[in-house]
Image (spheres, rainbow, N blue to C red):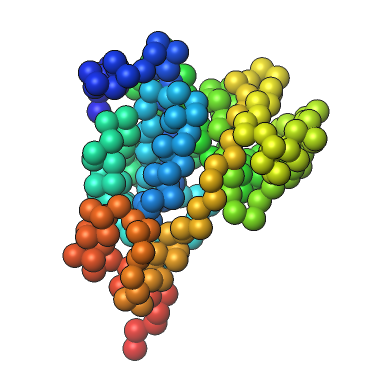
């Protein structure tokens, strides 16, 4: 990956306002699906990002690994999913690091690779951000990245008033976000880059449902990019119950 190279067509289409704005989208991507891509496209467009960097987890600290495909397999699926999108990239930072990876370590490594001229935008679902205070070095993460908190099914932006690191929130504005009256909200955080709350169109696709449908031989109904669907079927991924006891 060469952070200094630019696709010529991409450079022409974007103003200088969007230069050096890097979105970070991490996850197990088990598998990557159209919902992930929709989030990346939406944030890219709304926040005028230069690129979005997909970062598959190696050994995620907050997930069970029983049904997790191998790291290299998940990396390959991301590569297939974004191959035709010049402003999407993938990084194997967490996979290559090995062991348990924490977001603070990943952000430091991205910063060292891209340099200080790049502003980092950490894209995260509302459900995950509600647990953000339990992460390693959350205050430092808020200083290093501008957080972009996006809608998740069954979650309310009004729940942000329970996050210990946030204070003096405009609860009326949060309610308007939930009702669709506001389409974006900025939250200032002292001595940090702050947050953007960004409602996005609802997406009911889930990786667990995709795995279930693959295992049961059910149609995937446009849940996956075609190259990823082909790869899963040709590689016989998710065909067995990893928790099943073989006798």
Viewer-closest of 217 and 55? 217
Q: Quadrant of residue 240?
A: bottom left
- Residue 46 rendering spot, x and y as whole percentages: 50, 29
Question: On the rendered structure, is 196 left or right of 163?
Answer: left
Q: Quadrant of residue 131?
A: top right
- Residue 6 rendering spot, x and y as whole percentages: 26, 19
Image point (54%, 50%), residue name: 202
Relative vertical location of residue 45 with respect to residue 71 in this rendering, above or below: above
How many marks are shown on the rendered structure?
A: 0
- Residue 83 rendering spot, x and y as whole percentages: 23, 40
Residue lying furthest bottom = 247
Q: Quadrant of the N terminus?
A: top left
Residue 215 appears anywhere in the view: no
- Residue 239 rendering spot, x and y as whole percentages: 30, 73
Residue lying furthest left = 234
Q: Quadrant of the C terminus?
A: bottom left
Q: Quadrant of residue 106?
A: top left
Image point (63%, 20%), residue name: 192
Image point (34%, 84%), residue name: 246
Residue 191 appears anywhere in the view: yes
Relative vertical location of residue 126 with respect to residue 198 in this rendering, above or below: below
Image point (46%, 42%), residue name: 39
């Amino acid at each position: 990956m060469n952070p200094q190279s630019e696709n010529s067509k991409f450079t022409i289409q974007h103003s200088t306002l969007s230069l050096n704005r890097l979105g970070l989208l991490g996850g197990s991507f088990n598998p990557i699906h159209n919902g992930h891509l929709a989030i990346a496209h939406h944030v890219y467009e709304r926040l005028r990002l230069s690129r979005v960097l997909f970062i598959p987890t190696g050994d995620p600290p907050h997930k069970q690994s029983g049904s997790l495909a191998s790291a290299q397999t998940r990396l390959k699926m991301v590569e297939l999913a974004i191959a035709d999108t010049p402003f999407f990239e993938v990084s194997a930072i967490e996979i290559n690091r090995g062991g348990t990876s924490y977001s603070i370590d990943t952000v430091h490594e991205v910063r060292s690779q891209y340099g200080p001229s790049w502003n980092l935008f950490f894209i995260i679902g509302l459900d995950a951000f509600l647990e953000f205070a339990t992460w390693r070095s959350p205050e430092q993460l808020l200083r290093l990245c501008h957080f972009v908190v996006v809608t998740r099914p069954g979650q309310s932006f009004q729940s942000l008033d329970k996050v210990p690191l946030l204070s003096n929130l405009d609860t009326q504005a949060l309610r308007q976000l939930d009702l669709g009256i506001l389409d974006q909200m900025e939250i200032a955080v002292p001595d940090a880059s702050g947050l953007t709350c960004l409602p996005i169109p609802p997406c009911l696709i889930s990786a667990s449902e995709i795995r279930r449908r693959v295992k049961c031989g059910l149609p995937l109904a446009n849940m996956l990019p075609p190259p990823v669907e082909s790869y899963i079927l040709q590689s016989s991924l998710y065909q067995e119950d990893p928790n099943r006891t073989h006798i």
